[in-house]
Image (spheres, helix red, strand yellow):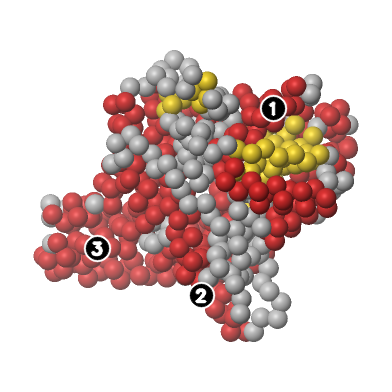
Amino acid sequence: MNKTEEKGKNLYKPKDREGGFPSDMPYIQRRFFETIPGIFTWTLLLLPVIFALLRWEIALVVYISFLVAYWLFRTIKFAIGAYIGVRRMEEEKQIDWVGKIKELNSDKFSDLRYIYLCPVYGESLEILEPSFKAWSESDIGAKKIDVVVAMEEAKKDLQIENFNTLKQKYGNKFGSMRYYIHPAGIPGEIIGVKGANINYAARELVKDLEKEGKKISNYLVATCDSDLRPHPKYLSAITYRYLTSEKPFETFYASAVHSFNNNIWNVPPIIRTQSNMLTLVVLHYWVLSKDVKIPFTGERLHTKDTFSSYVVNLKTLKEIEFWDPEIPNDDTAFYWNSILRSKGEFRSEEVYVPTYNDAVENKTFIKSHVSFYKQQYRWGWGIINYPISLAILFQDRENFPVYRKVLLSKTMFEYLWFLTVVFVLTFGLNIMGWLNPAYQYTVFAYNLPRILSYIFSVIMLSNIVIVVSRRKITPIPKGWKWWRHILDFFETFLIAFNMITFSFIPYMQAITEMMFGRGKFKRNFYVTEKVRIEKE
């Protein structure tokens, strides 16, 4: 019998969950919650069709006018948040975080250790070695870092060889280096998502540390993709936040500047534009929208979820049951799991010291775009966190305050709504004209497009702020010709194309599949290849 099974049960999953949902939840309730995101999103997408068929021209005009005003507000907020975030990044990169830690005279720091949890699949040393080098140069001291490589059984021969090579080069720099091999074929686990891999490694690590008599509350776990290269001050900045936090164990820590600088100038323009915009979106959320004030109570609910890489205490990780290997998401799922298990008390704290990651890249131009679509599709399945969270909020009628349920639900539905905004703005009036020819002869059909074009022209001016902010985070290559600077500016306009293609279609595909999935998740996902474009 496989050691991960006992009487047919998978021992490497949360004890109270089945397929992510509460284990005691009836099937019919689970299916109801799984359909909610799809029903809500498709209803919003079809509003122009509904209004056109019902001849509600004014209703559509009012709705689109509201969307334009909202888009203008979001654009201004985005530009301000990105600008402030860049200023904070420049300031924090200059701070002597190790010196500030010493000034605290905290006994906790001397006992504190770090776990670099690195999941791998088919990566070559070309990808892994720069990451290990960057972690070994952390100003906190590499001897305080214990490396844990989480391997998949299917690629264990390659990765054991890579591990031995890396250990020979960096073994004397880090505190320790070890690896765990995640067995293939564990019942119920999703394939192609790193959650099951790091979940297995973290659980095995805790067992080993406790057997060794180690106190797991002395460990901070840094989980990330294998290509992430931290700034030398990344861990020291997070350590300072951890040591000065009001609730260090109820908090996750992350960089607000999640850049893709490793290979950003090698990837195709569409992927580069999307990656750069994602960096600024994450940054502005940390600056202006990481929490919301709860009316009448003075409390703040932290709504900024985890994304890709973050740091959390190992004791906390154990208490929240690690990661769920039976759902197709591990990044944002960590936040939603933590916030639900803590009854809304879980918190987030950020640093503005950057991390450097890989944008999606494959061996050829076409393969890069195919890989990018598949990655976005996998990310789209991250929406499974919403029906799971709604199900738990619905079920918990005693311990979870009502106002927190309302605010968390608002966060979920606002994201789904925002996913539809660009589509409706782009095609809404045309759909009305196609399905309701009489609309073309109204005053709205003549004046509204002209007014909207003026407003969008003003919105486009924000590209100046966006380009300036982006270049502070991602410096341009040296020796650029003048015309390349002009192209770089106009590449920003590709974000509009992205928002109705790569940032829309794969997400709608995932949401729709979940809606009609009959309670069955997609089980096998594409593992994003971490390779470089082949040059002639």
**Residue carrying label 2:** 490
Residue 158 in sight in this render: yes
**Residue carrying label 3:** 429
Residue 84 percent location from the top left of the image: 64, 54
Horizontal arrangement in the rendering, residue 258 relative to residue 519 (left or right): right
Q: In the displayed image of the protein, which residue is found farthest to the top?
A: 398
Q: Earlier in the sequence, mark 1 or mark 3?
A: 1
Q: How many numbered markers are drawn? A: 3
Marks 1 and 3 in Cβ contact (< 8 Å): no
Q: Earlier in the sequence, mark 3 or mark 2?
A: 3
Secondary structure beneath dot 3 equals helix
Q: Amino acid at mark 2?
A: Phe
**Residue carrying label 1:** 206
Calculate the distance from the C-alpha at mark 3 to the C-alpha at mark 2: 26 Å
Q: In the displayed image of the protein, which residue is found farthest to the left?
A: 438
**Residue at the spot x=35%, y=46% of the render?**
511
Horizontal arrangement in the rendering, residue 414 relative to residue 464 (left or right): left
Please name whichever residue, 285 or 487, is drawn nearer the observer in this view of the structure.
487
Secondary structure beneath dot 1 equals helix
